[in-house]
Image (cartoon, rainbow, N blue to C red):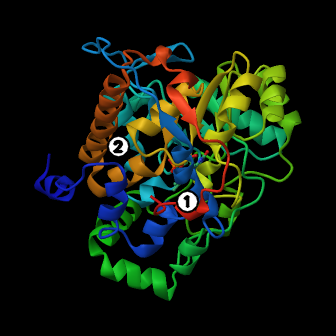
Amino acid sequence: MSMTAKRRLHDIYQLTDFEKAVKRYLPKAVYEYVRNGAGAELSLRRNRAIFQRYLWRPYRLRDVSSLNTKITLFGEEYAQPFGLAPTGGAAMTRYDADRIEAAAARRHNLFYALSANSLTPLEEIIRINPRTWFAAYLPSDLGVIDGMIDRVQKAGYPVLLITCDVPVPAQRIAETRAGYSMPIRPNLRATIGGILNPGWTFGTLGRTILRDRNPKIVNIRPQGGPGLFSNEIAAVGGSPHFTWDHIRHIRRRWKGKLILKGILRPEDAEEAARIGVDGIGISDHGARLLDSTVSPLEVLPEIRKAARDMSVVIDSGFRCGGDVLKAMALGADAVMLGRPFLQACALAGSAGLDKAVSILSTEINRDLALLGVTDLASLDASLLRDLGTMSFAERAPETT
Ligand SMILES: Cc1cc2nc3c(=O)[nH]c(=O)nc-3n(C[C@H](O)[C@H](O)[C@H](O)COP(=O)(O)O)c2cc1C
């Protein structure tokens, strides 16, 4: 581990520490792009507070000397029940973040989804990590959809995840106020942020431009892709014309496993099951889209039921081992985390991700033992006391 990484990581004890620590090293526009949520950030706070709804009822005097945290998801075995969520724009937070994340997931035997909103060709990422999932933002044009499916299939991706919750671009005020924009447009606040953070300006932005000349979102279209500075970049994201008909079409063409991410209603899970989708991602996109939605954790039990034999992955607001175990007890098959891994990578690259994985794995092992449970399959709702739906607003801690 480099001295810089060591220094930056020395005071990190929990995943929420990454957000505080990385603030010093990123321009405000980039820091806020990762941290912020939509609107008044009510959902961002609620996604944390919702974990207070469930309290543990641990068993005592059971032999917990040997624990098993492995899961099997889409026919593959992973070391832990958590994985790295797709996060667009990762390479803006650290030079080469897409490759660093893919390699870390492989090293630790975790699942990882590459966002279509990325700078590294998907064909290279699958060589680094052959079990990478591809997280697509698709338009409604069937020709483009077919071209993308064929490209991802030819590259050898085993899992296609469709991000279903972005029919129109969201509004996030903190990042906009700090000068973040797509396409990138020079503005006073962003420029000041760059000057105040020369480490990022030269080490991340400068190096990326030096390598790519005109960095492009290369995985959003069958060929090419819009540059970070071009107006065409509005195409990055979903389409208001994209519907269940497109999912039916995709299901017929895509031979691998198919996941729909962004589901928050049981009816949508039922429709996905009817179409033959393999898994659903219960998610509010980390509170980055529609503010004041239900939190994924509180709709998990009803969606689990509706999902029948589909796999259920959940994300949004998970920050410690206990959070992950609560979702497993309520019926999730796995949990994805977005910001903590992105911030860990931005702070200290591979070493940052190693630390994040180590913290979360250690917490999961410790909490299982403290619960008196030796394997994840034994987690169920009887381990939890449900305080019921209530307003958490007044008790919401900080956003992290
Ligand atoms: C900076 C950032 C970029 C994201 N980009 C994508 C994306 O391209 N595709 C997608 O499906 N979800 C994207 N997400 C959402 C994550 O996949 C995930 O749902 C969310 O981060 C989970 O919440 P958490 O950050 O609280 O863990 C992004 C999230 C962040 C923070």
Image quadrant occupied by the C terminus: bottom left
Residue 382 picture location, percent across and down: 55, 22
- Comes first in the chain, label 1 or label 2: 1
Horizontal side, residue 289 vs residue 33: left or right = right
Instruction: For residue 112, say whether it is visible.
Output: no
Q: Quadrant of the N terminus?
A: top left
Circle 2: element type: helix
At horizontal 38% and vertical 66% (from top left) the residue drawn is 205
User: Residue 180 placed where, x, y %?
Assistant: 53, 73
User: Is residue 320 shown above or below 348?
Assistant: above
Query: Where in the figure is residue 270, as x and y percent of width and height?
Result: 82, 26
Q: Quadrant of residue 293?
A: bottom right
- Disc 1 secondary structure class: helix
Q: Nearer the viewer, residue 130 or 346?
A: 346
User: Can you see residue 352?
Assistant: yes
Q: Who is closer to the viewer here, 218 or 267?
A: 267
